[in-house]
Image (cartoon, rainbow, N blue to C red):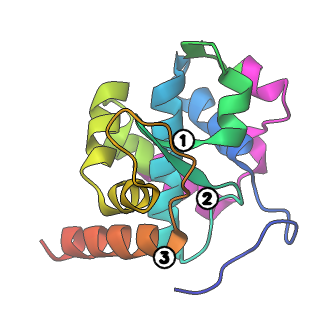
Amino acid sequence: MAAGRLSGGTGMANVLDVAAYILRAKGPMTAMKLQKLCYYAYSHHLAWEEEQLFPERFEAWANGPVCRELYEIHRGRLQIRLGQVQQHGGKASALNAGERESVDLVLEAYGDLSAHQLSEMTHAEAPWVKARERAGAEPLDRSRERLLDAEIFEFFDALTSSDAEG
């Protein structure tokens, strides 16, 4: 996997920009669903483009991967709307054409699934499972263990390669 763009470099979009793009495309949704769609957009973009979609990282929380920076703006809210992300600086227009294409493909594949379905999917996938194992976390335990880009890339690259072949 290529090193990809690192934060602070080339004007890379951030997680709030991706969240704004998703909310603009799909409308208001639960905070958990938005977290999982951001995770899947990040993961697939990493596998397809061999670069990070945004510099923020995901942690292996009990309900699946969570980006703390996104969590901070929706803490205590069940639903989240575009305006709530925009007031914290999220700009859907910050994504370049390749980033938009990755997010659009993820929304096409996952956008109609429920938050619970998306969470359950992450629980069966190696990046989250391995991070929880590293943390020694039981099913309902809190964990701040980060999901590793190398493990995300390996899992989603294999997944997308098998999809292309089959």
Find residue 24 and report its image quarter.
Answer: top right
| Element on which disc 3 rests | helix
The residue pinned by badge 2 equals 99
Q: Which numbered disc flags the more N-terminal residue, 1 or 2?
A: 1
Please give the name of the residue rendered at 28% of the width and 75% of the height, measured from the top-left corner: 158
Q: Nearer the viewer, residue 140 or 80?
A: 140
Measuring 48% from the left and 76% from the top, which residue is drawn there?
A: 150
The image shows residue 33 at horizontal and vertical percentages of 45, 29
- What label does residue 66 carry, if any? 1
Question: Closer to the observer: label 1 or label 2?
Answer: 1
Q: Along the polypeptide, which appears first: circle 1 or circle 3?
A: 1
Q: Position of residue 37 (x, y in %)?
A: 47, 40
- Quadrant of image for the C terminus: bottom left
Question: At numbered mark 2, what does the secondary structure look like: helix, strand or loop?
Answer: helix
Q: Is residue 95 magenta?
A: yes
Against 55, is 82 above or below?
above
User: Range of the magenta residues?
Assistant: 83-105
Q: Amino acid at mark 2?
A: Glu
Quarter of the image for residue 4 reads bottom right
Q: Residue at x 85, y 70 (%)?
A: 10
Residue 50: x and y, percent?
54, 78
> Mark 1 touching mark 2, by CB under 8 A?
no
Name which residue lies at 44% across and 50% down: 40
Looking at the picture, how far across and down is residue 60, in whole percent? Answer: 47, 48
Question: Disc 3 or disc 2, which is closer to the eye?
Answer: 3
Q: Quadrant of residue 81?
A: top right
Q: Amino acid at mark 1?
A: Val
Task: Using the rendered image of the protein, determine whether residue 75 is visible from the camera's viewpoint.
Answer: yes
The local crowd at label 2, few if under 14, some if 14 to 19, many if 20 or more residues have their Cα within 10 Å, is: many
Indicate yes or no whether the magenta region holds residue 108.
Answer: no
The residue identified by callout 3 is 150
